[in-house]
Image: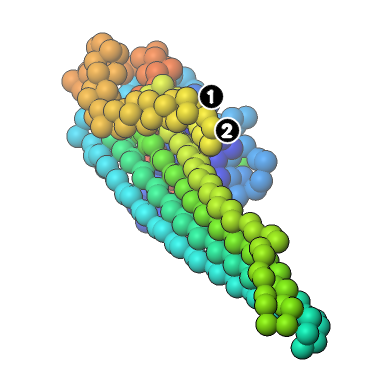
Amino acid sequence: MAEDNPTSVSVQRAAAQGYLLLPPIATPIRPATCFSTALAATPAMNPFVSQHTPFDLDRLESSNFIYRTQDNCRGTYLSSSTNSSSSSYDHLSLSLGVSVGNAVLGASVTGSYDKSVLEDRSKSKTSRKTSFQAGAVQFQRPPPLSEEARQLLLPENGGFDAFTKRFGDFYVSGFTIGGDASVVISQATSKSQNVEKLKVELEVRVLCFSDTETIAEVDTSTSSFDVELNLYAFDSLDRSFVEFSAANGTALRFVDARKLAVEYGWRVDRMPARIEESVKSLGTILDARKPLSWGQVGGVLQSNVVSNLILLPFSTHREVRGYVNG
């Protein structure tokens, strides 16, 4: 899940699309909570403004929400696979010869050394990701401002700049219903073969006679095979995150990795159906024909079907926009 302090956001992008989407955080954020992009750009600062609110609390508590199934209904599915391989071959060959003696008696030593190394490496990565949204819950009407906030918007009291400095420049107007799941598997293999040959011979000559003897001979061949597997998986519906690795000599770990890959692959493929089942499990709370109360919204926020917080800029609020350029 996302950190309690989301990373800095792009105000320009939000202004262009008219809203801002943020992933939910560990602590549920209520609608009407204010958000400051200036604080979001400051490390270790909480961008949600909780100590001040520009809204009329009495009228805010009587506000209703509506579940719009035709807003923000969309889904994406991404699948990718990459493979790469490389080979290298090194060969070293040496020879030597030493002779001593004269025409009657002599001796010589000859030797040869050969070494060859063959290495093959390969990497593969497979990823599957899905994101599905099944509507949004938002205020039925923009929440009304308090008298204090309206007074602050007056030019003689600082205007829109003073307003955003105190309350932030966005507010949570609702949230989308949906979920995300992904699984990424990467595997790296390395195979090497090392062959070494060494041979040393001694030749003795007496007049016209000679005798050759091998005094040292080594012929070795070694090989190795290494494999490393990493799996990363995420599912927002049960808030699970898996980071799994397996290497040589851990056959059971590879079996476990395969089981996890199959399980999270199923979660990715079934995400739309799982979202629909989760919405149905909320009973009559998410009913597009009826407004939602604060209590019902709290029940939805406690579930795992909230995929994004919807933040609207104060500059678009009907009681604020007339002061934006003032």
Q: Residue at x 70, y 61 (%)?
A: 215
Q: Is residue 62 left or right of residue 37?
A: left
- Residue at which label 2 appears: 4
In the picture, the disc for residue 27 is 1
Position of residue 233 relative to residue 79, above or below, is above
Position of residue 127 relative to residue 33, above or below, is below
**Relative image position of residue 12 (x, y in whole percent):** 45, 57
**Relative image position of residue 132 (x, y in whole percent):** 28, 35
Disc 1 element:
loop
Colouring method of the image = rainbow
Disc 2 element:
loop
Q: Is residue 151 visible?
A: no
Q: Nearer the viewer, residue 231 or 155?
A: 231
- What amino acid is labelled 2 in the image? Asp
Q: Nearer the viewer, residue 220 or 129?
A: 220
Q: Residue at x 79, y 81 (%)?
A: 105
Q: Is residue 70 left or right of residue 39?
A: left
Q: Nearer the viewer, residue 303 or 80?
A: 80
Position of residue 290 relative to residue 318, above or below, is above
Q: Nearer the viewer, residue 305 or 320?
A: 305
Report if the CB atoms under discs 2 and 1 are less than 8 Å apart. yes
Q: Residue at x 46, y 63 (%)?
A: 87
Q: Is residue 143 left or right of residue 44?
A: left
Q: CA distance from mark 2 to mark 1?
A: 8 Å
Q: Residue at x 53, y 47 (%)?
A: 224
In the picture, the disc for residue 248 is none
